[in-house]
Image (cartoon, rainbow, N blue to C red):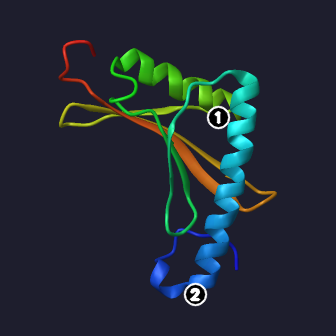
Amino acid sequence: MPQTDTPTDTVPAATLRAWQKRAHQQLAEFLARAERADLPPLRWTISVNGNLIGEADGLNYPAPAEQREVIRRWASLLDMKVDTEHTTDGREELYAGWKNAKNGTHGCFRATIFLHREDA
């Protein structure tokens, strides 16, 4: 069964675990590549359906410029474009989605920047 964004209640638990295992293997590959490229660390999450999300959060990268640069560098690792959205409630959302057709994994690099901060 290919990994999808369908509701997880329709997917057998064994399949979900297999997707999570693939995401874990993808994370190990990303971390090895990041070490060679000297990329800054991200906070990683593997969702129930195996999506792999790397986040440059405001706690580890308090300056908005740092968050932007961290996501830009990670996106460049995969030659991905970073999409930016400004929300009506004063946030800047950065997102670079990726899919690995070889192993069926997918996810994103992301950051939420709160623009009301003085250093934004």
Pick whichever of labels 1 and 2 is earlier in the sequence.
Answer: 2
Residue 8 position (above or below residue 109): below
Q: Residue 44, labelled with which disc?
A: none
**Alpha-carbon span between mark 1 and mark 2:** 32 Å
Q: Nearer the observer, disc 1 or disc 2?
A: 2
Furthest-right residue in this view = 102
Which quarter shows the N terminus? bottom right
Nearer to us in this view, 23 or 69: 23
Residue pictured at 26% horizontal, 33% vertical: 91
Q: Position of residue 71 (x, y in %)?
A: 52, 29
Which amino acid type is marked by label 2? Pro
Residue pictured at 64% horizontal, 34% vertical: 80
Quarter of the view holding residue 51:
bottom right
Residue 64 position (above or below residue 113): above
Which amino acid type is marked by label 1? Met
Name the element at disc 2: loop
Q: Which residue is mark 2?
A: 12
Q: Position of residue 34 (x, y in %)?
A: 69, 31
Name the element at disc 1: loop
Q: Position of residue 20 (x, y in %)?
A: 61, 66
Q: Residue 80, labelled with which disc?
A: 1
Residue 42 position (above or below residue 5): above
Furthest-top residue in this view = 119
Residue pictured at 28% horizontal, 16% vertical: 120
Residue pictured at 53% horizontal, 68% vertical: 5
Direction from residue 88 to residue 72 in the image, left or right = right
